[in-house]
Amino acid sequence: MKEFIDLRSDTVTKPSPDMRKAMAEAEVGDDVYGEDPTVNALQEKVANLLGKEAALFVPSGTMANQLSIKTHTQPGDEVIIEASSHPYNFEGGAGAALSGIQFQCLKGSRGILDASQIEESIRPADHHFAVTRLICLENTHNRGGGSIYLLEKMAEIYRLAKSRELSVHLDGARLWNASIATGIKPQEYGRWADSVSVCLSKGLGAPVGSLVAGSKEFIDRVHRFRKMFGGGMRQAGIIAAAGIYALDHNLERLRDDHQNAKRLAVGLKELKGISIDPKHVESNIVIFDVLNSGMTASQVGEAMKRERILVHAFGRTQIRLVTHLDVTAEEIEKTLKAFKKVLEKKE
Ligand SMILES: Cc1ncc(COP(=O)(O)O)c(C=O)c1O
């Protein structure tokens, strides 16, 4: 019996016994010398999945994004990004601190940007302005509620970028979810970005690890910065093995998480005081508003905790739930019952 049903994030999963077995049995070597066969196999697998020449294993999604930004830019450059994106908001100011870039933030529709608004924001070639160098996209978009880019939208943005000699980086921490939700292969998405970061420790359930993928020349340069950022790891095959296991076993089952998220959204919509549009739930993230409940998000969060359910409250009235492989359909029903109890108690 679990102590809590934990819906705060899909990062809270624990490695399964079979995943741990794969880790324990992994063949390893010193990856800083490029001699870890399991890391090499993972890198090749992910490069193939994303349709790129090469990929590099790194400790976190944050490092994957920031290495990409560093490699694409020079200090003083400008990076166009969505205002609620992860690299801008939740990576400790790394863009400024580690790459010396400035972000230009555009407001997207649930995190999704249009080529036309990006085009208007590219700085003219004038010495008053920073040089626009890079466009960062996020798919699925975390704060957008797991929203997914239409492939055509990404293609349009990429074509615009190329016509203006800009690079495109895709924060694909949950690109796997986008792919399973739409049936569009990761390499189809990868085609419309120069670099892609992906995570193994979110929906896929590995304990740690992300990768950056791109051209061989790009990844060679990322490799140098990975060393500089302190991300060179030694017998990392132990954790890479968990990533290989996750890709082999936990990709298709993301469908269950999406179904569970949809069920949550539909059930929550029935409850008084909650404002949510279930059609906005496209993958494994559910964001909703409790403004009309007479409680703040943190009050709802505290009351849910007393029901042994953990949720992520942010802002005054918003709550995020993320479904993942350690939450069952039955637990989703329990969660809905608990929300009903918490909100009815208030009345
Ligand atoms: C969209 C997105 N990008 C990047 C990251 C960063 O990943 P990490 O926590 O591994 O640094 C996250 C983490 O949740 C994320 O949601």
Image (cartoon, rainbow, N blue to C red):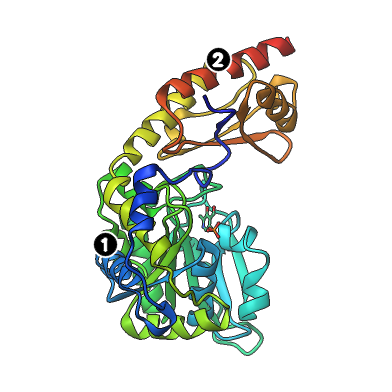
Picture quadrant of residue 328: top left
Mark 1, other Cα within 10 Å: few <14 / some 14–19 / many ≥20: some
Residue that label 2 marks: 337
The amino acid sitting under disc 1 is Leu
The answer to whether 96 appears left or right of 9 in the picture is: right
Residue that label 1 marks: 49
Distance CA(mark 2)–CA(mark 1):
40 Å
Residue shown at the point (24%, 67%) measured from the top left? 48
The answer to whether 47 appears left or right of 338 in the picture is: left
Residue shown at the point (48%, 23%) measured from the top left? 331
Note whether 6 is above or below 32 in the view shown: above
Report if residue 269 is visible in the image. Answer: no
Q: Earlier in the sequence, mark 2 or mark 1?
A: 1
108 or 57, nearer to the observer = 57
84 or 8, nearer to the observer = 8
CB-based contact (under 8 Å), mark 2 and mark 1: no
Q: Position of residue 155 (x, y in %)?
A: 32, 63
Report if residue 56 is visible in the image. Answer: yes
Residue shown at the point (63%, 84%) measured from the top left? 76
Mark 2, other Cα within 10 Å: few <14 / some 14–19 / many ≥20: some
